[in-house]
Amino acid sequence: MQAQPSPDAILQTGLAFWASKTLLSAIELGVFTELARGPQALESLRGTLGLHSRAARDFLDALVALGFLTRNDGRYANRPDTDLFLDRGKPSYVGGILEMANARLYPFWAGLTEGLRTGLPQNEVAHGGPNLFDTLYAVPARLKQFLAAMTGISRGANLAIARQFPWKDYRSFVDVGTAQGDLAAQIALAHPHLHGMGFDLPPVRPIFEEHVHALGVADRVTFAPGSFFDQALPQADVVLMGHILHDWDLPTKRMLIGKAYDALPDGGALVVYESIIDDERKENAFGLLMSLNMLIETPGGFDYTGADCAGWMKDAGFRQTRAEHLVGPDSMVVGIR
Ligand SMILES: C[S@@+](CC[C@H](N)C(=O)[O-])C[C@H]1O[C@@H](n2cnc3c(N)ncnc32)[C@H](O)[C@@H]1O
C-alpha cells in the first residue's frame, strides 16, 4: 500500500533555516567554547554570553532539543561531538565553515531566487566586482576565516584520501589551491615517505605555514606561491585538487585539468575531489546544493558528476579514470596519465 502523502518533510525543509541559524548563532556567540570549560547554569551562561533574559532559556533549550547540548540539574553542557568539534580552543574545531556560513552564506542565500532568474552571483561580487578570491583576500581576517572554513569542510575527506589512495606507489605530490594545507598535512602525517607542496596564491603562505607547522609536518610539506592562471603547476607524481574545479566555468575546469596533466609524469595521478554529484543527478542533494552555492558565490562555477569529470580527464589525455566514494557527500575522481 502506498504511504499517505504527508506535509512533514515539506514543513521540515521549509523551516530548516530556524534550526540552522540557531546553531550558527550558537557558534558565533561561543556557546560551545564557553561550555568546554565546564557545565554552567542558565544565569551564569546568560551573563557570559551576553544574552537578553527574554531569549536565553529558549535558545539554550532549543540547542538541547536539537541535540547539541545537554541539560542536567539545570546545568547546560556540551555533547561529546559539539565539545570536540565546536570548541574553538581545540585543534579538532570544524566551525570555520559554519562561521563563514553565518557571516556570508546565510545572508547571500536570501538572493537565491534572484540568482536563479539571472544566473548572477549574489555575494560581495554581485554587481561586477573582483572575483571571489580577490574579494575574500582583500581583508586579512576574512582570508583567515575562509581558509579555516576550508579545513572545516574538508577534514573528513582529507583523512579519507590519506587513507584510501595508494600512496605507497608515489613519492611526491602537489595540492593545488591548498588553502591551510590540511590535505597535504594529513597525507604527509599518514605517509612518512612522501614530500608534498601546497600551491596557492601568495597571501595564503603565512596561514598555510602556521597550519603545517602546528601539525608537525613543515619539514616535508612546503608552500609554492603562484596563480594557476599565470603559470604551470609544480611537477609532482600526484596532483590534487579539492574544491577547485567547482569554482570555475567549463573552459577553466578544462584548462586546470590540462595543466595537471602537464605537471605529471607518465603513470602519475590527478586526484579531484569535492561533493561530486551522482551520475544520475538524483541522490547527492548536498552536491547539487553545493552547485547552487557556486551560483551564489561565482560567475561561472558549478558542481558536476563523476562521469562529467572522467570525460574532461579523458579529453585532456588521461588514459584511465575511476571515481571512489570518500565520506559523506564527497567522492574523488582519479585520472592516471
Ligand atoms: C574552495 S578553496 C579549496 C581549498 C582546499 N583545496 C579544500 O578543498 O579545502 C579554493 C582554493 O583555491 C585557491 N585559489 C583561488 N584562485 C587561485 C589561483 N588563481 N591560483 C592558485 N590557487 C587559487 C584559493 O586561495 C583557495 O585556497
Image (cartoon, rainbow, N blue to C red):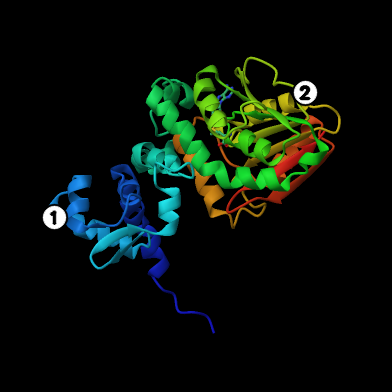
Type of the residue with mark 1: Arg
Report whether 219 appears left or right of 296: right
- Rendering coords of residue 337 (x, y %): 82, 33
The residue at 31%/42% (across/down) is 28
Closer to us: mark 2 or mark 1?
A: 1
Type of the residue with mark 2: Asp
Q: Residue furthest top?
A: 230
What is the number of the mark on residue 217? none
* Vertical placement of residue 191 versus 220, above or below: below
Question: Front-most of 7 and 39?
Answer: 39
- Rendering coords of residue 70 (x, y %): 33, 63
Q: From the image, tell me which residue sits under label 1.
A: 54
Category of crowding for the residue at label 2, using alpha-carbon neighbours closer than 10 angstroms: few (below 14), some (14–19), many (at least 20): some
Q: Residue furthest bottom?
A: 1
The residue at 45%/49% (across/down) is 85
Report whether 199 appears left or right of 72: right
Marks 2 and 1, how far apart at CA: 62 Å
The residue at 65%/25% (across/down) is 219
Category of crowding for the residue at label 1, using alpha-carbon neighbours closer than 10 angstroms: few (below 14), some (14–19), many (at least 20): few
| Secondary structure at numbered mark 1 | helix
* Vertical placement of residue 200 versus 38, above or below: above
Q: Would you identify the image quadrant in which residue 9 lies?
A: bottom left
Q: From the image, tell me which residue sits under label 2.
A: 262
Can residue 168 be seen here? The reply is: yes
Q: Are marks 2 and 1 in contact (CB under 8 Å)?
A: no
